[in-house]
Image: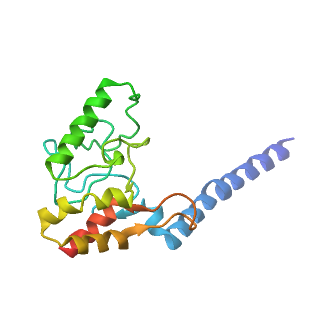
Amino acid sequence: MLTYLRRSLLLALVLIAVLGFAYGLAGTGVAQALFSYQANGSITKHGSALIGQNWNGYSTTKILDPQWFHGRPDPDNPLLANGKPGESGSANLGPRSTVLLQDVKALVKAWHAVGVTPTTDLVTTSGSGVDPDITPQDALVQIPMVSKATGVAPSRLRALIARETQGPELGFLGSPVVNVLALNEALAKLR
């Protein structure tokens, strides 16, 4: 009986070592070797391409910096770019919420102040609160603001948006999108 117990323990230790450690390390090694950009969180010089964030840093005073393109607002506090890292999730404000209505009206006013007639997406939050993408239309309506603030011709900005637009997945799933971080990185290189 002691022999069976030793064999069982030895087999359990071998399986833990092989399946628990070696398999995990092999998977990590393959991911790092073949897909290091994705395995490391799609991090660029200015942040993650998978998480919506402010390009101009976390400002507690400025809702919109007219020199850059902007994504959807922060659900935690859409009127401030407070940028509390690690927080995500929707604000859970329903369609009859007076807070939601006030926030949207204030955002529309802020967009108008910088010369933009905002789309619905630019004044409402996404379900996750960390959506990194906007529609090409969301980017196009921001061209007058960015052009005026940077001096870059609107035609060059339209070409930049067209170049940074990603088509639907597999050619037919979803809608075309523009990653705001990638768009702003390309704009920084253009300037």
Q: How many marks?
A: 0
Q: Is residue 7 visible?
A: yes
Give the left or right position of residue 39, taking residue 183 as reference: right
Residue 96 picture location, percent across and down:
38, 24
Horizontal and vertical percent for residue 25?
A: 56, 62
Q: Residue at x 63, y 60 (%)?
A: 23
Quadrant hosting residue 173: bottom right
Looking at the picture, does residue 103 appear above or below residue 47? Answer: above
User: Taking 54 as reference, is 106 above or below it?
Assistant: above
* 89 to 146, vertically: above or below: above
The quarter of the picture where residue 128 lies is: top left
Q: Residue at left 23%, top 63%?
A: 143
Spot occupied by residue 76 in the image (x, y as percentages of width and height): 31, 36
Please state the horizontal and vertical placement of residue 49, each as a whole percent of the image.
Answer: 38, 60
* Residue drawn 40% across the image and 43% down it: 126
| Colour mode of the rendering | rainbow
User: What residue do we see at 40% from left, 67% from top?
Assistant: 165
If the image is split into quadrants, where does the N terminus sit? top right
Query: Left or right: 84 with respect to 49?
Result: left
Nearest the eye: 112 or 182: 112
Which is nearer the eye, 77 or 105?
A: 105
Residue 47 showing in the rendered view: no
Q: Residue furthest front?
A: 117
Q: Nearer the viewer, residue 91 or 115?
A: 115
Quadrant of the image occupied by residue 129: top left
Name the residue at the right extreme.
1
Instruction: Please give left or right for residue 36 compared with residue 150 in the image.
Output: right
Q: Is residue 93 left or right of residue 80?
A: right
Locate the C terminus and report the quarter of the image it occupies: bottom left
